[in-house]
Image: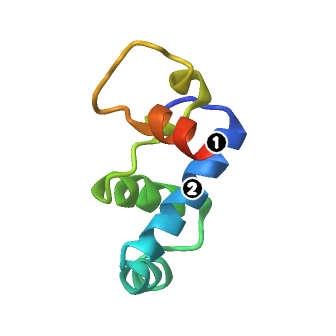
Amino acid sequence: MINMPDFDFHFFIADVIVETVQYGHRTEFCQKLTTEIGDSNDEILKWFSDWAPAHRADPMLYDSNVLKETKYVSSYNMRQWTYQYCS
């Protein structure tokens, strides 16, 4: 994962979970989280780092330093989305 501020990382984690529920993967997410993963933070983070990109969640799009970048990159659409929901 990229080196991002803690508040951006926490938002990323929360958003992945919310989007998982919103887009119909809640049961799969919960089953995997409760049956396939150990209790250590390292195991949970490893699993999560595999789950997120498989469900189109890119941590790069949550890094406030990246969102400040004004160069247009078509695959980095979170800046536009952030502008839209904040205004």
- Measuring from the top left, give residue 14's x and y in whole percent: 60, 60
- Measuring from the top left, give residue 65's x and y in whole percent: 58, 22
For the residues labelled 2 and 1, say whether their Cβ atoms are less than 8 Å apart. no
> Mark 2 packing: few (<14 Cα in 10 Å), some, or many (20+)?
some
- Left or right, 11 with respect to 23, comes to right
Q: Nearer the viewer, residue 40 or 6?
A: 6
User: Eyeballing the image, is 72 above or below 14?
Assistant: above
> Mark 1 packing: few (<14 Cα in 10 Å), some, or many (20+)?
few
Residue drawn at (48%, 41%), measured in percent from left and top? 81
Q: Nearer the viewer, residue 17 or 22?
A: 22
Residue 80 visible in the picture: yes
| SS type, badge 2 | helix
- Measuring from the top left, give residue 7's x and y in whole percent: 71, 42
Question: Which of pointers 2 and 1 indicates the residue nearer the eye?
Answer: 1
Residue drawn at (37%, 72%), measured in percent from left and top? 23
In the picture as drawn, the residue positioned furthest to the right comes out as 7
| SS type, badge 1 | helix
Which amino acid is tagged 1? Cys
Q: Quadrant of residue 42?
A: bottom right
In the picture as drawn, the residue positioned furthest to the top comes out as 71
User: Eyeballing the image, is 28 above or below 48?
Assistant: below
Residue drawn at (66%, 50%), measured in percent from left and top? 10
Residue 86 numbered mark, or none:
1
Q: Nearer the viewer, residue 76 or 56?
A: 76
Q: Quadrant of residue 87?
A: top right
First-in-chain label (2 vs 1):
2
Residue drawn at (37%, 78%), measured in percent from left and top? 25
Q: What's the CA distance linking mark 2 and mark 1? A: 20 Å
Which amino acid is tagged 2? Ile
- Measuring from the top left, give residue 41's x and y in whole percent: 60, 60
Residue 1 visible in the picture: no
Pointer 2: what residue?
Answer: 13
